[in-house]
Image (cartoon, rainbow, N blue to C red):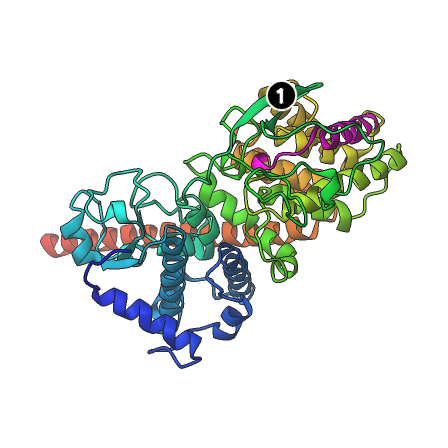
Amino acid sequence: MSALLLTPLDYTAAGYWQDFLAERPIAGGIVYETELRDCVLDESLASLQRVDTLLTQIRRDMIKAGQWHEETVLVDERYRNFMVFLAFYAGRVLAQQWQHTPHWYGQFELRKRYPNVPLTGDDFYQHMAVVYREAAEHSTLTNGSMSVFFALEPIGLRLFGHIDRPFEAVQGGQVASGLYQAVSARLQNASETPIVKATVSDAVYTIDTHKTAEPYLDTVPDLDTASALPQNPRQSSDSLSAKIETSPISANNAPSTTDYQPSPDLSRAETLAVDTASDTLISSKLASVSKTPPTPEMFTQLLIELNEIEVVQSADNMAYQQACHVLDQFEEHIAKQNKPRAHVVFSESHLKAKKQALLKLQAAANAGNTAAMLRLAMYELLGEGLAVDQSAGVATGAEWVKQAASKDDSRAQRLLSKMYYQGIGVAQDIENGQYWLTQAAKNGHAEAADLVVHWQQAQDLISTQKREQHSIKRYQILLGAVAVVAILILIIL
């Protein structure tokens, strides 16, 4: 732990936290205190996901109430204290992951310690930052450094980011959408376990070198049953139950959660403007889950929609249901992990059962079942499908989504809009993203319809402002002309 002297902001952060734990009023007060307590702030990474869901709901409530005005909100001390409290909390969670004491610095100290940082004096989101690991205490901050965290930036983006209000990171690059993503990007790598690649039929997977393959089972084994899984070599031989081993995987394997990020131009603000409602659909699940699901959010959302939004299928629904019965067991187990899904290693018998299920999905998709197309597309885009390599899988996955979208499946159209907005599997294209979002709304997708309404309201506001600016300019020109005529009259007389 660091032995540096505490800064004024360190005392403030500690005071905020102690007051919150003791249920005492924070100086100046904070909004949404009850909702914060419902998030269960247990200093875990999962709690940051719950906080992000709360921020999304606050944003939606402000939009619906017509109070979504950043400048007005920041004038309110209770809102500023709320955002600062969340920043302090995120810094606390992040530093804890590094086994370090967080040290907070205001702009004055930041300018002295890190003179190369391009701070803006009047930017609320840049007026404080936390140093969260030992190596950073005596180093110079440079672009790309992961040692100093401006925690207010992802909070601001989550609440107020949109296409006309992009957020630029002080440290360069793009601002993360929410605290969980921002903190996760700064975590240490997990301890390594020797792994090798092994080719199983058409797909490449990683297998722990300590493990032995199991005989093929006609049905997928219970993923929580000790006898069905190889034992972790780091556990004692008398362990009551074996767990599926997880270990880091090289970049050329299936992509992790962090691979699915928008490109650094308009996509971050654009994505937040159209995707912010997604979190609320899984908020009820997050409250009861101790670990954050490692699957990228857009696919978590898709799995929910496949279960909750019914689309009548005319082809091979039985094969689709059989495949899902197997694949759901994999998803349930992966969801329990606190690592990207690409780091979860399965035995060969599990992989064979999974491939058999994917082949059933493919048959149903070829028969025209749009739900099967989407489920298969998800695995292809994640690099876990039937394609021979990741590049081919991404292309195949994108084509399945397009085919399902062309059949008026609103779930596919919503997913395709996200892919175009974020540039996943397709070239980033904001106009196409908006088109498919509109199509999804027309076909009854409630979230898409809600976002289209807000989008139209924003466009109407922009048009009104432009008309007002044009009218003001015309009025100024008219006044100028009257003044010139008056002067000429005076000269003539």
Query: Which of the image's four quarters has the C terminus?
Result: bottom left
Amino acid type shown at disc 1: Ala
Residue 60: % across, % down: 55, 60
Q: Which residue is mark 1?
A: 198
Residue 283: % across, % down: 61, 59
Total marks drawn?
1
Asked which quadrant contains residue 435, the reply is top right
Question: For the magenta stretch, what is the residue range?
Answer: 342-363
Q: Residue at x 63, y 49 (%)?
A: 336
Is 199 colored magenta in this rendering? no
Asked which quadrant contains residue 370, the reply is top right
Q: Residue at x 78, y 31 (%)?
A: 353
**Residue 414 located left or right of residue 97:** right
Task: In the displayed orientation, state which residue is furthest to the front.
Answer: 238
Residue 435 shows in the view: no
Asked which quadrant contains residue 77, the reply is bottom left
Q: Residue at x 70, y 23 (%)?
A: 386
